[in-house]
Image: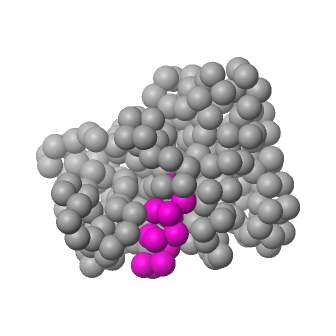
């Protein structure tokens, strides 16, 4: 066990240099639990990675929002895992639903990206999650299992993977999954990992929730046993991100 609480901030395609510096200033001034209690990673757009890395407090880390599926080369517009490593960027978010939906990234493609990024030494926040249609059709668990399987088939070491369950219907909608809904899927994912990968991986892999997480709803969600943290979108651009980081205390006192 001993899964350290994890809070990621996905800034998506937002910000100017001035805005980014302002967010970093707010984060740097925030009083949060120690790194023994919570791991914090923020993910600005590629172009702001160097400035954020330079200015950000040392106990917080940075993540890219994507990287190319293999070694760099003639892939106009892409950024390779090697480049992220070269810049000292430790983390990358892969398989976000916005990329799956808007850029047609398949389960297999995401699985390959995860495997390649890990092979280069990056740590990966791998995103999975069902659409509203899929939930209403009762196929949530099949969908997230298939997404996870495409990753599991391609990797052998889960140490550097955080699994982010982000139901598409909850992303940017203000419609958060109830703590019970999040717990149900997280527990099923853990069972899946136990059966298909190993009991050790199931016990140690962090499964975090994303989708309209806010300062107001984070504590209740964090109190659920299989919710090991959050991937936060909109609220990660605001001072309330600090409150979300503080929800790690709920776990400590559990
Ligand atoms: O997509 C998300 C994080 O990756 C969640 O976004 P919101 O928190 O804005 O719903």
- Is residue 119 inside the magenta stretch? yes
Query: In the rendered image of this protein, does residue 25 appear above or below residue 221?
Result: below
- Is residue 254 inside the magenta stretch? no
Q: Which residue is drawn at 71% across and 34% down?
A: 140
Q: From the viewer's perspective, is 39 left or right of 144?
A: left
- Horizontal and vertical percent for residue 213? 54, 36
- Horizontal and vertical percent for residue 43? 36, 54
Q: From the viewer's perspective, is 199 left or right of 226?
A: right
Q: Residue at x 71, y 48 (%)?
A: 145
- Horizontal and vertical percent for residue 231? 52, 47
Q: Give the range drawn in magenta.
A: 110-121
Q: In the rendered view of the protein, which quadrant contains the N terminus?
A: bottom right
Residue 201, image quadrant: bottom right
Q: Residue at x 75, y 39 (%)?
A: 141
- State whether the magenta stretch is mostly helix, strand or loop: helix
Answer whether residue 150 is visible to the viewer in this image. Answer: yes
Query: In the rendered image of this protein, does residue 220 appear above or below residue 203?
Result: above
């Amino acid at each position: 066990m001993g899964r350290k609480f994890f809070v990621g901030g996905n800034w998506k395609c937002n910000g100017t240099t001035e805005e980014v510096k302002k967010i970093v200033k707010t984060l740097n001034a925030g009083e949060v639990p120690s790194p023994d209690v919570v791991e914090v990673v923020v993910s600005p757009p590629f172009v702001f990675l160097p400035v954020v890395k330079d200015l950000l407090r040392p106990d917080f880390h940075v993540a890219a929002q994507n990287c190319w599926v293999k070694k760099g080369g003639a892939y106009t517009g892409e950024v390779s895992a090697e480049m992220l490593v070269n810049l000292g960027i430790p983390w990358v978010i892969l398989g976000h639903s916005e990329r799956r939906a808007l850029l047609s990234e398949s389960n297999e493609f995401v699985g390959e990206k995860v495997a390649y990024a890990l092979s280069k030494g990056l740590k990966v926040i791998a995103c999975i999650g069902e659409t509203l249609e899929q939930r209403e059709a009762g196929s949530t668990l099949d969908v997230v299992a298939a997404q996870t399987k495409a990753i599991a088939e391609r990797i052998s070491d889960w140490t550097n993977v955080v699994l982010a369950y982000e139901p598409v219907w909850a992303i940017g909608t203000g419609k958060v999954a109830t703590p019970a809904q999040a717990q149900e899927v997280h527990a099923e994912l853990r069972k899946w990992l136990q059966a298909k990968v190993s009991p050790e991986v199931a016990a140690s892999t962090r499964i975090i929730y994303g989708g309209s997480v806010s300062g107001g709803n984070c504590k209740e969600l964090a109190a659920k046993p299989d919710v090991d943290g959050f991937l936060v979108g909109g609220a990660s651009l605001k001072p309330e991100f600090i409150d979300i980081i503080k929800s790690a205390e709920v776990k400590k006192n559990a």
